[in-house]
Structures are given as C-alpha cells and as structure tokens.
C-alpha cells in the first residue's frame, strides 16, 4: 500500500470513527444535561474546566513529541518509547495527583471538590495515553486510537443512560467519567508493544531538549485556552457556567476533527522537514490546511446558523438560551483552524522556541482580558476574549511557519470552501423545518454537493481514498 493510500485509509477510518464519536459525545451531553440539571451541570463544568486546565498545563506536548521523535532515525524505537512512557507516567501522576489538593483552596461547594478528586483519575489515564496515541499516529495505526475512543464513549453513554434511569446523583456520574477514560487507556496499552519503566540518560536528555519549548507552549496554551473556564465560576452563577460549558462542549467536539487531521499529518510533515524535502513538505502542509478548512469552515457557519436549535436539542429547553453564546464562540473556529494547522507545523519543524513567545504573549493578554471582561460582561466577556486569543495565536503561528519554510497557502480551495459554506448557511437559515437534525442533514448534503461540483477535492484523490467498487464502475468519471 502506498503512503498516500495509508494516509487516505487511516483518515477515512478516523473520519467515520470521529463522526460516530462525535454523535456519542453529543448524546452523552444530551443525557447529562437532562439528568444533572442546570446547576449540577455547572458544577460538572467547573470541575472538568479546572482539570482540563491542569491537563493541558501538564500535557507538555507528549503526543506530538512522541510521534515526531519516533519518525526520526536517531534512537532505537523500543528504548525511546520506554523512556518517553516513563516520563509521561511520572508527570501525569504528579500533576493529576496534586490537582485535587490544589482545588481545596477554591471557594466551591464540597461536591465539586470531591468531583475533582474523582475525575482526576480520568485525566491521569488520558495523560498516560498520550504516549500511546503518539505512537499509533507515527505508525499510521490511528484506527486503534479511534477504537479506544469509541470504547470510552460507548461506556460513558450507556453508563449515563443507566444512571439517569435510576435517578443517580452528581458524584456517581463523575465516577463514570473516570471509568470510561480508564477503559480507553487500558485498551490502548493492551494494543501497544510491551513498554517498561526506563530512564535512558541519552534519550532523556534528547527528550527534554526536544520537549521543553513544546512544554512551555502548552503551558501558556492552557492559560488562554482554559483560563476562561477556571476564572468564570469565580464571577458568575452556576447556571451561566453551565450555559457556557455546554456551548464550549459542543465546540470542543466540533474542533476535534482538526486535531485528528493534524495528528495524522504532523509526523509526515516532520519526516519531510527532517530530510530537507521542502517541496514534499509544502505539498503536505497545503493538504493539511485544505483538509482542516474543509471540515471547520462549514461547521463554523452551521453552528452560527443553528446555535439555538443545537443547544435546545443537546441540552433541552433549559439550555436553549445558551444558543447565543454558542454562536459567539463559533466565531473562534476560524482562528482555531489556523492555530491547529500552524501550531502542529511549528512543532514538526522544530520552531517551538519561536512559538513560545506567541503563546506567552497570548496567555498574558488573555488572562488580563478574562479578569477585565468577565466581571463586567460575564460569559460574553469570556467568549470575546476567547475569540481574540484564537485569532491572535493562529495568525502569529502562521507568520512563524511562513517565515521559516517560505510556505504561503494557496487559497483556491479555501475560496471554494467558503463559497460552498455560505450557500449552505443561506439554505439552512431559510429552511422551513423546525428540527435541527434535518437542517444539519440538508446543510451537509448541500455543502458536499457544492464541494464536489467545485472540485474542492480532486477526482484522483476521491478515487484513491474510496477503494471500493464505485471508482471501478466509473462513478466519478464525470466529476
């Protein structure tokens, strides 16, 4: 199988897996919002928001660093994998173990503090799994990541349904989250080659030299990405936190597709760059940019058009008013598009040190903004600073990559994507039906047909990605 076919098959498997995972995630939010109610869902958002902040703060970029270092010929893979796994295990234990103790200092109800202690197990499992995820990405076996994620999502959804039937309270629902994440981690570990505790000094030095700029970037990232969800509960009611958190949960699920794409492409970008194959690097970066735009631009406009319907469907009638905040937050997706592509690329070409200053400045500006605008404007102040921070980071990272690689993206595909997305937006905003699922289905069909007619994706690419009988019988010959 050619490299291009490997990428295509991995992408296709993950695409369908991510669609299914997204649906399962939305269904879980659907159950949890109704089961917990607005106030307790706000408690959940507060607990998870704090742990997500700690999780991103202590992530240190292990996924992308694992994938990139395994793509380089410098060390024997088994020793490299053992050493990276050991350091990830230690850092995850220290930070997720200390998070519940730190949270005791916050002025929140005891139920939220207990929830943080319970869910920290989930984030420990996710942290350790980062190494496994990076390994499977480098090996182009990301279907294993997809399977593990689906196992966790199914367990979480079924457990939430069962708990809601028995009218379970807040803390059992939090315990379920940790169970689901732990099962995902166990599955990924089971599919790995055997790993053991190892402190290879030469590899450790190389790992620290490679990871410290990435770690600083990720630490600063945590302040502007998660600062709003840590600061917001200090100034607003639990119901406002619930509305903001539910909207952000929908947004998080949407943007996971871009992380999936760049998780596949980043090791390939690193491979081309490390071997000074600049033409191949630019071609792969253009593909990355176009693929992320293909998914994120229409979802941004679709979320804006259907925001109230989406939140009413996901959270129930009590959450319908959160649609307005979702429409604001969705504006950040375009900045996220740039940030995701060029942030991963900066890591792939070893320009983390230059990126550190972007994330540091963004973190400082964002935290200042959160403390100025959240007390005055509540959730809308948080949303405004979030939009600014995503655009600021995205375009600065683009500047770094463009300067060092001399890459300027071709905008022909982006123009077609924006045009197709705007037509889709007009269709779904004027659609007579009142049900959000029908609007999404119609919008998706309109966008897909326009993308095909405008040849956003070439016929040759479609033929290679879809290996079945449709191509054999000339189904795409007229495209």
Image: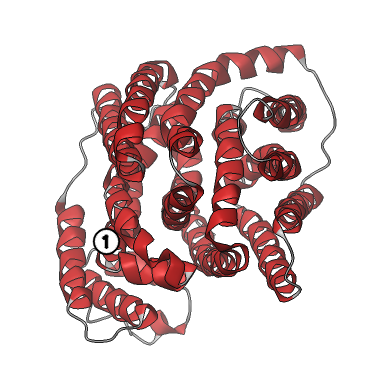
Residue depicted at x 67% and y 37%: 127
Screen quadrant of the N terminus: bottom right
Across and down, in percent, residue 452 comes to 24, 72
Q: Residue at x 72, y 38 (%)?
A: 124
**Location of residue 56 in the rendering, given as x and y in whole percent from the top left corner:** 55, 33
With 217 as the anchor, is 383 left or right in this view? left
190 lies above or below 368:
below
Instruction: Work out whether residue 432 or residue 270 is closer to the camera in this orientation and state it.
Output: 432
Which quadrant would residue 103 be assigned to in this image?
A: top right
> x and y percent of residue 170 in the render?
69, 56
> Which residue lies at the image location 74% right of the left edge and 66% below the top edge?
168
The foreground one among 349 and 218 is: 218
Say whether residue 134 is left or right of residue 308.
right
Q: Is residue 283 visible?
A: no
Q: Classify residue 274 as left or right of residue 384.
A: right
Pointer 1 local density, CA inside 10 Å: few below 14, some 14–19, many at least 20: many
**Residue 40 against residue 73 in the figure, above or below:** below
Seen from the viewer's position, the closer of residues 314 and 215 is 314
Residue 190: image location, x then y, percent:
81, 51
- What colour scheme does the image use? secondary structure
In this figure, which residue is indicated by the disc labeled 1?
304
Q: Picture quarter containing residue 210? A: top right
In terms of secondary structure, where does tag 1 sit? helix
Q: How many marks?
A: 1
User: Which residue is painted at 29% across and 22% down in the image?
Assistant: 404
Which quadrant is the C terminus positioned in?
Answer: bottom left
Choose top left, top right, bottom left or bottom right for residue 21: bottom right
């Amino acid at each position: 199988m050619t490299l291009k076919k490997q990428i295509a098959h991995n992408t296709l498997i993950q695409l369908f897996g991510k669609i299914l995972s997204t649906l399962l995630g939305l269904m879980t939010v659907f159950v949890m919002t109704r089961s917990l109610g607005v106030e307790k869902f706000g408690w959940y958002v507060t607990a998870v928001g704090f742990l997500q902040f700690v999780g991103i703060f202590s992530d240190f970029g292990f996924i992308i660093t694992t994938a990139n270092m395994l793509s380089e010929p410098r060390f024997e893979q088994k020793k490299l994998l053992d050493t990276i796994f050991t350091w990830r295990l230690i850092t995850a234990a220290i930070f997720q173990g200390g998070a519940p103790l730190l949270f005791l200092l916050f002025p929140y109800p005891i139920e939220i503090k207990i929830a943080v202690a319970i869910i920290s197990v989930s984030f420990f499992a996710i942290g350790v799994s980062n190494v496994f995820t990076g390994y499977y990405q480098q090996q182009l076996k990301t279907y294993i990541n997809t399977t593990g994620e689906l196992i966790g999502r199914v367990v979480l959804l079924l457990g939430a349904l069962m708990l809601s039937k028995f009218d379970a309270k807040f803390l059992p629902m939090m315990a379920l989250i940790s169970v689901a994440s732990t099962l995902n981690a166990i599955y990924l570990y089971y599919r790995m080659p055997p790993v053991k505790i190892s402190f290879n000094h030469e590899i450790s030095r190389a790992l620290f030299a490679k990871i410290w700029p990435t770690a600083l970037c990720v630490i600063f990232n945590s302040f502007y990405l998660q600062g709003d969800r840590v600061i917001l509960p200090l100034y607003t009611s639990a119901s406002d936190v619930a509305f903001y958190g539910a909207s952000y949960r929908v947004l998080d699920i949407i943007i996971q597709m871009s992380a999936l794409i760049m998780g596949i492409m980043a090791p390939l970008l690193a491979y081309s760059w490390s071997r000074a194959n600049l033409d191949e690097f630019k071609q792969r970066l253009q593909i990355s940019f176009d693929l992320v735009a293909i998914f994120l631009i229409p979802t941004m406009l679709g979320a804006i058009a259907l925001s109230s319907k989406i939140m009413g469907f996901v959270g129930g009638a009590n959450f319908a008013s959160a649609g307005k905040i979702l429409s604001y937050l969705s504006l950040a997706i375009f900045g996220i598009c740039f940030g995701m592509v060029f942030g991963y690329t900066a890591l792939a070409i070893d320009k983390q040190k230059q990126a550190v200053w972007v994330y540091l400045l963004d973190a400082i500006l964002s935290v200042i903004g959160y403390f100025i605008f959240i007390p005055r404007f509540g959730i809308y102040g948080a949303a405004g600073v979030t939009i600014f921070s995503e655009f600021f980071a995205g375009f600065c990272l683009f500047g770094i990559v463009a300067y060092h690689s001399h890459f300027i993206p071709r905008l022909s595909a982006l123009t077609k994507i924006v045009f197709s997305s705007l037509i889709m937006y007009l269709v779904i905003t004027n659609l007579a039906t009142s049900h959000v699922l029908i609007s999404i289905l119609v919008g998706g069909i309109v966008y897909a047909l326009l993308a095909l007619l405008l040849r956003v994706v070439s016929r040759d690419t479609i033929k290679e990605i879809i290996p079945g009988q449709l191509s054999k019988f000339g189904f795409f010959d007229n495209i």
